[in-house]
Image: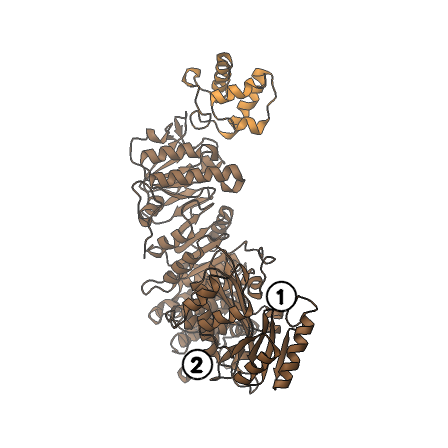
Chain colours: A orange, B brown
């Protein structure tokens, strides 16, 4: 289970890449369906998460992640 | 026509209502739209706007305020008004969420453009199954996923829910395709030829709406008079045939169907064990079944649109009699050759026509068919020749050929040709043109196309289209007979078939089955000893044939398990002993069930009849000439069972080598009604017994007219289902 700090950092990065207000992003927000991430933005998000957390992720697996919580859990496994 | 209704589920709509929500929506939500030009999720929305859709469009784009100047919604559920059609361009993995919300919103028409379903493997298959369950749950109708979209050019709709580059012109041709990429090519091609469409749809993975549904819908579509299909995978083969038969030969408003069938492979040929099975694995089944359905099979897009133009814009020709009007001898000869090769006939002009031509044309002109108005002809000579042939009752179709020479007033002639046609519109004659060339003739071609006169670069293509139109006319006017129900002993056949294990029936059992269905058989009995064989032969009469009955021996002739034309008791006794001794070198005594004694069949023509199970069309029946013909030429034809007498007759006539049966060089013609009868009985047998996997009657020996036919050999393979 990802801790609250990782989730908050995921929200912050997501808000920056998608130009959104961080307070409007929920833990269960779907990057595409709720937050409107387009395909290029999804790739940008993966890159931004890698930079933020100093990790390398498998791109295909990372792009399959759908929600903020799922992303935080996926990232936590790499920390 | 009959409406089979929509997917099961809540408040299910009829097929008509469901597809009307897709093709004639009042309001559309596009889910997953983006602001990035030159991407599908963007262009599809812009296409809807630029095609001047006559309803309301709502973009659903999470966290975006507007798309292309139109206020956007985060979710489809946020749209305050009713929505008829949802177009989903979200990535495949979130389409399920979007679709569920569409269901909650009460939307009944859906197009999923997105890929990422069945075509990408296991995960995609599961996703598509989930999509189908949502569609069923809410009683929606779905086109796609993985498709180009749908277009309806009706002026009060103007729907372009696709990512094609441009909305096609309005017309009376409907095009449906499994391949989306092909659609864009077709649209571009058609635009270049000035061809318009009524409906245009790419069906993609066909998770819900398929070609059968679309045909039913188009049958009643007033804007559509010709239907074109590009098919790769057919799933509901029997229904496709039934609905196509209805549409192409309906008593009111029949519509021709032209189809390209791609992607049919020979897979399964290796598994087939009979002649029929191996031949059925080839594309020839599709040829036969399409013909049975009234579908005109096309081998290329060029051919399809060539024929479609004629059927869409011109009266259907009454007969195959044509007149050719040309300003060049060579192309006239080419056109004549092409026409004759395709079964068209050059009309014989009346004396009035000849007199009119003599009066109007120079002496050097050819007044007979093909009419050569000579190279220096201008529009006046074309008009004179065309007036003459349009007034001649012997002419039903007219092909006008032009080659551009220095004095040829191309546009003037094109206009004059169209004017003559219009003046004689009440005569309902078919007019096609071939202005040969590209650059110089282009302005003339444009005039022809604008007036609905199909134009072909080559006269051969014109002849192809005219031939197809005649074929369709012949189909529409064909003699129709119901499937005859012969008196058969079904119980007797069932007693054999139901108790037999999987695999081949023994020859005796196979003959019993045929006997029960009234096939013409020579008397036969199974003998267990030489004495018994002689007694049987004495009873049924000489000459006789002996045939070993041992399931382990497949190739009887090679094992010397067949002896023909035995004319006396002595010959029978010797043959019996020799055959048994020889066969015992290969199998044990327990493997031999006995030796069949059968009266010898008089000589005749050998034909092959067969049954095979096609994975798309179910049981299909085959007919071909036997012996070397079936092996060397693969000259066979197939139909889906059951068949009528008329269909049996067409199967026989369809063979390239059917003249052999009609009698060559003074030979007596074969008893074709007897073959028709055997084909119908075989069709009933296959219909009645699902366990029959494959069957060959090879050969059936056919005698001269009035003398019938006899089964010489039969193999029946059963399987459990």
Q: Number of numbered discs present? A: 2
The residue singled out by tag 2 in the image is: B349
Question: Residue drawn 41% across and 67% down?
Answer: B491
Question: Residue drawn 43% across and 37% down?
Answer: B130
Image: B294 above or below B713: above
Q: Where in the figure is residue B257, as x and y percent of width and height?
A: 42, 60
Q: Where in the figure is residue B440, as x and y percent of width and height?
A: 53, 60
The residue singled out by tag 1 in the image is: B590
Q: Where in the figure is residue B153, as x and y percent of width and height?
A: 37, 49
For disc 2, the chain is B
Left or right, B647 with respect to A54, comes to left
Q: Quadrant of the N terminus of chain B?
A: bottom left
Question: Residue drawn 63% across and 75% down?
Answer: B562
Q: Closer to the camera: disc 1 or disc 2?
A: 1
Image: B358 above or below B2: below
Disc 2 on helix, strand or loop? loop
**How far apart are the two marked residues, 1 and 2, measured between alpha carbons?**
77 Å
Residues B417 and B179: in front is: B179
Residues B645 and B184: in front is: B645
- Give the quadrant of residue B608: bottom right
Q: Are marks 1 and 2 on the same chain?
A: yes
Image: B169 above or below B489: above
Answer yes or no: is residue B427 visible: yes
Residues B342 and B50: in front is: B342
Answer yes or no: is residue B452 visible: no
For disc 1, the chain is B
Q: Where in the figure is residue B428, as x and y percent of width and height?
A: 36, 70
Image: B134 above or below B515: above
């Amino acid at each position: 289970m990802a801790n609250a700090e990782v989730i908050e950092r995921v929200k912050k990065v997501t808000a920056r890449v998608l130009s959104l207000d961080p307070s409007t992003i929920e833990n269960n927000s779907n990057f595409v369906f709720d937050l409107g991430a387009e395909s290029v933005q999804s790739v940008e998000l993966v890159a931004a998460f890698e930079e933020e957390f100093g990790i390398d992720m498998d791109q295909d697996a990372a792009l399959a992640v759908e929600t903020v919580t799922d992303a935080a859990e996926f990232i936590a496994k790499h920390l | 026509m009959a409406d089979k209704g929509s997917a099961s589920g809540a408040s299910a709509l009829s097929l008509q209502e469901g597809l009307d929500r897709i093709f004639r929506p009042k309001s559309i939500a596009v889910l997953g739209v983006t602001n990035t030009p030159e991407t599908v999720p963007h262009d599809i929305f812009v296409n809807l706007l630029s095609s001047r859709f006559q309803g309301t469009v709502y973009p659903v784009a999470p966290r975006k305020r507007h798309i292309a100047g139109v206020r956007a919604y985060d979710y489809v559920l946020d749209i305050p008004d009713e929505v008829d059609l949802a177009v989903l361009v979200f990535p495949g993995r979130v389409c399920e969420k979007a679709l569920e919300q569409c269901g909650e919103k009460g939307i009944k028409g859906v197009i999923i453009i997105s890929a990422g379903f069945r075509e990408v493997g296991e995960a995609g298959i599961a996703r598509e199954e989930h999509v189908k369950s949502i569609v069923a749950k809410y009683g929606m109708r779905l086109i796609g996923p993985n498709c180009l979209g749908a277009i309806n050019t009706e002026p009060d709709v103007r729907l372009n829910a696709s990512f094609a580059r441009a909305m096609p012109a309005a017309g009376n041709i409907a095009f449906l395709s499994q391949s989306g990429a092909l659609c864009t090519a077709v649209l571009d091609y058609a635009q270049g030829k000035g061809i318009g469409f009524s409906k245009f749809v790419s069906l993609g993975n066909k998770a819900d709406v398929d070609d059968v549904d679309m045909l039913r819908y188009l049958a009643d579509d007033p804007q559509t008079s010709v239907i074109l299909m590009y098919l790769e995978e057919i799933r509901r083969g029997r229904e496709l045939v039934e609905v196509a038969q209805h549409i192409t030969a309906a008593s009111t408003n029949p519509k021709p169907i032209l189809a390209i069938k791609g992607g049919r492979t020979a897979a399964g040929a290796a598994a087939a064990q009979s002649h029929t099975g191996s031949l059925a694995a080839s594309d020839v089944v599709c040829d036969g079944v399409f013909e049975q359905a009234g579908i005109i099979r096309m081998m290329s897009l060029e051919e399809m649109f060539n024929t479609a133009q004629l059927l869409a814009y011109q009266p259907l020709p009454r007969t195959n009699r044509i007149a050719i009007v040309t300003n060049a001898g060579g192309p006239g000869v080419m056109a004549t050759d092409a026409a004759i090769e395709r079964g068209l006939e050059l009309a014989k002009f009346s004396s009035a026509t000849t007199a009119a031509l003599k009066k109007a044309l120079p002496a050097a002109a050819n007044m007979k068919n093909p009419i050569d108005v000579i190279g220096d002809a201008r529009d006046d000579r074309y008009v004179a020749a065309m007036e003459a042939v349009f007034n001649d009752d012997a002419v039903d179709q007219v092909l006008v050929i032009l080659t551009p020479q220095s004095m040829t007033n191309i546009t003037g002639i094109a206009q004059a040709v169209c004017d003559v046609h219009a003046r004689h519109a009440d005569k309902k004659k078919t007019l096609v043109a071939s202005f040969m060339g590209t650059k110089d003739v282009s302005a003339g071609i444009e005039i022809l196309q604008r007036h609905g006169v199909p134009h072909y670069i080559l006269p051969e293509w014109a002849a192809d289209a005219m031939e197809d139109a005649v074929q369709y006319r012949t189909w529409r006017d064909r003699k129709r007979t119901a499937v005859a129900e012969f008196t058969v002993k079904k119980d007797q056949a069932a007693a054999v078939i139901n108790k037999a294990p999987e695999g081949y029936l023994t020859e005796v059992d196979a003959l019993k089955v045929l006997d029960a269905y009234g096939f013409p058989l020579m008397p036969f009995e199974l003998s267990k000893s030489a004495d018994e064989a002689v007694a049987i032969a004495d009873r049924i009469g000489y000459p006789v044939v002996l045939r070993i009955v041992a399931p382990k021996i497949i190739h009887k002739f090679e094992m010397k398990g067949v002896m023909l034309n035995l004319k006396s008791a002595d010959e029978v006794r010797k043959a019996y002993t020799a055959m048994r001794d020889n066969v015992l070198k290969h199998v044990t005594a327990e493997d031999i069930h006995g030796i069949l004694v059968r009266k010898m069949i008089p000589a005749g023509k050998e034909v092959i009849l067969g049954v095979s199970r096609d994975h798309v069309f179910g049981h299909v029946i085959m007919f071909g000439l036997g012996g070397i013909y079936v092996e060397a030429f693969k000259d066979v034809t197939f139909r889906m069972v059951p068949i009528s007498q008329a269909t049996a007759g067409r199967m026989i006539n369809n063979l390239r080598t059917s003249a052999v049966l009609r009698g060559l060089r003074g030979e007596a013609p074969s008893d074709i009604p007897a073959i028709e009868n055997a084909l119908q009985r075989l069709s009933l047998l296959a219909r009645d017994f699902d366990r029959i996997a494959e069957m060959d009657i090879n050969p059936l020996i056919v005698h001269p007219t009035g003398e019938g036919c006899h089964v010489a050999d039969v193999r029946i393979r059963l399987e459990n289902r």
